[in-house]
Amino acid sequence: MFSWIKKLRRGAATAVLATSAPEAQTAFPVAAPSAQEHASAFKREGNAWLEQGQLGQAAHSFRQAVLADPEDAAACINLAYVLCEQESFEEARTLLDHAVTLDPNNFDAHYMLGTACKELGARDAAIEHIRRSLALKPDFAIALRDLCALLAAGGRAPEAMALLEQGIAIARDTADYYFMRGNLLIAQDLLENAAASFRQALSLRSNDPPIWANLGVVLMRLDQNDEAAQCCERALGLDPDCAEAHVNLACVYGKLGRLGQARWHGQKALALRPGDPNAHSYMGVIFQSEGRMQEAIAAFLKALTLDARHIESLEGLGQIYQAIGDMNSALDYRNRVVSIHPEHAAAHTNLGATLHEMGDLEGAAACYREALRLDPKFVAAHSNLGAYHLLLGKRDLAAASLRRALDIDPDFVSARSVLLFSMSTDETRTASDYLSEARRYGITVAKKASHLTQPDWSRQGDALRPLKVGFLSGDLREHPVGRFLEATVSQIDAERLELVAYSTYAREDARTAQLKPLFRAWHMVAGLSDKLIAEKIRADEIDVLIDLSGHTAQNRLPVFAWRPAQVQASWLGYWASTGIAEMDYVLVDPISATRNMATQFVEKLWFLPDTRMCYSTPPFMQLATVSAAPRHSKGYPTFGSFQVLNKINNQTLSVWSEVLGKIPDARLRVQSMQLSEPSARNNFSSRLVAAGISMERTELHGRSPLEQYLAAYAAVDLVLDTFPFTGGTTTCEALWMGVPTLTLAGETLIARQGASLMNNAGLPEFVAHSKEDYVNKAVALALDPSKLQTIRAGLREKVLASPLFDSKRFARNLEEALIGMWHHKTGR
């Protein structure tokens, strides 16, 4: 405590501890000592004890001085100093209040009183007294530093910065001022300016470890990680026990993927500061990067035992629990962050993301809006709000939020990806519009990527060994991609292809467990940066790298911009161009894509012979029985839709309304998980009425367990497909349950997906080629219940024998495609 006094003793400044002026020497007899003389004697005695480090004796002597002369300001100040050293701040404050009453212009009293008030949490009083001390001694750098820190902590950063600039104007050769300014600039996220300020401080005092360490922090946040590491190493060269530098190096090396070194520095920081929550928190980050989630949780929890309000640990726990699927724990920790930092936009945005994933869409939206109230330029909140609007089918609002995010930060990749997802299925956007935006995305991620060291590609793809194929995806779990993928990879010939999985999502489930044995190697890369994933794939010598996500959730498309594999392709999880120039191919089939659609992609089209996807039925689906068509029991036809709301656009509703208008007794049954949300249900009901569809003829159903969901197909005679965002998984599930889907073939891959599925299922008559054709076919089929019943009775056996469900046939086709792409791209 009060280390400034020690610094003053070492310098040329006057010592703070005060005594009365020495008595004049005289040869005449003197009177009995006065109260002031007694006080002076006790002060001299107290100073002697203090010089020996004997605080208890010093306090006793100074207390006697105060008792001898309560009006002696110097005695009060000296006793207050010792009490502060003993952390008795309340008594020290009382003495110092008295001292400034006795001597209003005493610098020491005001500064010490300000420091005592700071320790007692009385920030405003601390600011007042330290400000008054500076008025008495404007060049006292330590007081200026403390005042700046108090102002910044009180949310008064502009005042703190103005004060610092005054100090710099007076003393430009004072390194402390530039150091303090750098710290203030970090808090304002002005990182480039902060780095410049730290460099100015180093030009004046190059042997200062904390300045080097803080410059390292800034450079790390600017992603200049190699230079950041050099700065932290320089700090350690000056002071091997600089805990801040060890902590920073742990984080830097973690970002660089040098996890062994990161762990060593983290452990060194903990040895130096076992009670430092930051060091434990950084170890949590390192363990998280290594996929050691339970150890990461333990490290974050240890940090919280030391500081129950440690924001980084609370947020780290929220992130981990959300990643591994413990949503209640994730919600708890993110609520705690918000309660501690109610003015922090990021905290509200992260809480919103948790609520969003839990299905509480309205709660999520409220969090995003609160974040934007606090910080109207918080990009992630704009982007997440756009995703919320999109999920509810509010495309205009979604586009506005996403465009606002990109206006603020044109390089914000996540917002650009969500925007592309929206545009890929938007009937008001042309394929040309989409491709232009996709190319902008490709340029954005290319700017963030740098070329990896060029390998000797000629060593890879040896004809004597299987082609090594990597799959990069966040959907290797209970997800449509996981379902379509499982049956296919289980049939791959290991002598032709060696399969390696790179999972970008930490959550695993029963389907993950079923998928893992089907791959030669499985790597969890969720915690790694794009660069580290790319380097990992390059080191594994992958011949062909396949993206299974496209612009859907959990994608890591930017990895492909690093060109980690010589041949790269997009397949299965997306239905439009990725926009990435380094993506060589996209896998399609002759119905889902015609050759003249090549102009819609930056990738080259590679045609599979039958279908671009093959469905596998989970065990629970195999137990579900096909029921009779409900028309016979109900006496009227029921059309059904099981799509998410963002697929059901106004154009689709208009056509459905026309169909219902031609069959007065027909009903419409819509089941969508979003309809469990009251606001989503109300909004969709309004859209139905606006399209001319009476609510009396409509049934709305929300989320349901899988068994109930499958049983719901017994309630519909015919599924009406959405367009241009046609069904995929739901269409296959309907076929399995004996219900055909009427689809409209469009002009893009996603708009023709339904046509491909129905043709491959052997039901080409359920493909319409215009809206008028769609309406006419829907009416004709609804009025021919015997035809629908005949189809229903034999549909499961029919599709099981079709290319759509023949995983062995599809696996052979996929093998040929991947090997063919390899030879075509490499010329070998």
Image (cartoon, grey):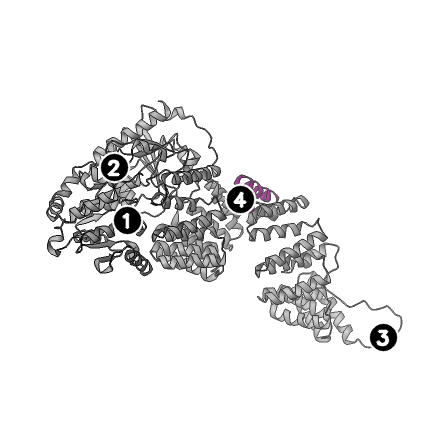
Q: CA distance from mark 1 to mark 4?
A: 46 Å
Looking at the picture, how far across and down is residue 661, in whole percent? 21, 53
Amino acid under disc 1: Thr
In terms of secondary structure, where does tag 3 sit?
A: loop
First in sequence: mark 3 vs mark 2? 3
Q: CA gap, disc 4 to disc 2?
A: 43 Å
Q: Is the Cβ of the residue at disc 1 closer than 8 Å to that at disc 4?
A: no
Report, in whole angstroms, how far the alpha carbon at label 3 lies from the one at label 1.
110 Å
Q: Earlier in the sequence, mark 4 or mark 2?
A: 4
Closer mark to the observer between disc 3 and disc 1: 1
Residue that label 2 marks: 488
How crowded pointer 3 is (Cα within 10 Å; few <14, some 14-19, many 20+) is rated as few
Q: Callout 4: 10 Å neighbours few (<14), some, many (20+)? A: few
Q: Magenta region, mostly helix, strand or loop?
A: helix
Element carrying mark 1: helix
In this picture, residue 123 sits left or right of residue 542? right
Residue 313: % across, % down: 45, 54
Mark 3 or 4, which is nearer the eye?
4
Using the image, tell me which numbered label, if any, was put on residue 30.
Answer: 3
Tell me: 468 left or right of 400. left
* Sequence-earlier tag: 1 or 2: 2
Q: Amino acid at mark 2?
A: Thr
Magenta part of the chain: 217-238
Which of discs 3 and 2 lies nearer the camera? The answer is: 2
Q: Quadrant of residue 431?
A: top left
Question: Residue 358 appears in which quarter of the rendering?
Answer: bottom left
- Which amino acid, mark 3? Val
Residue at the disc numbered 4: 222
Q: Residue at x 74, y 66 (%)?
A: 44
Going from N to C along the chain, the mark reached first, 1 or 4, is 4
**What is the number of the mark on residue 329?**
none
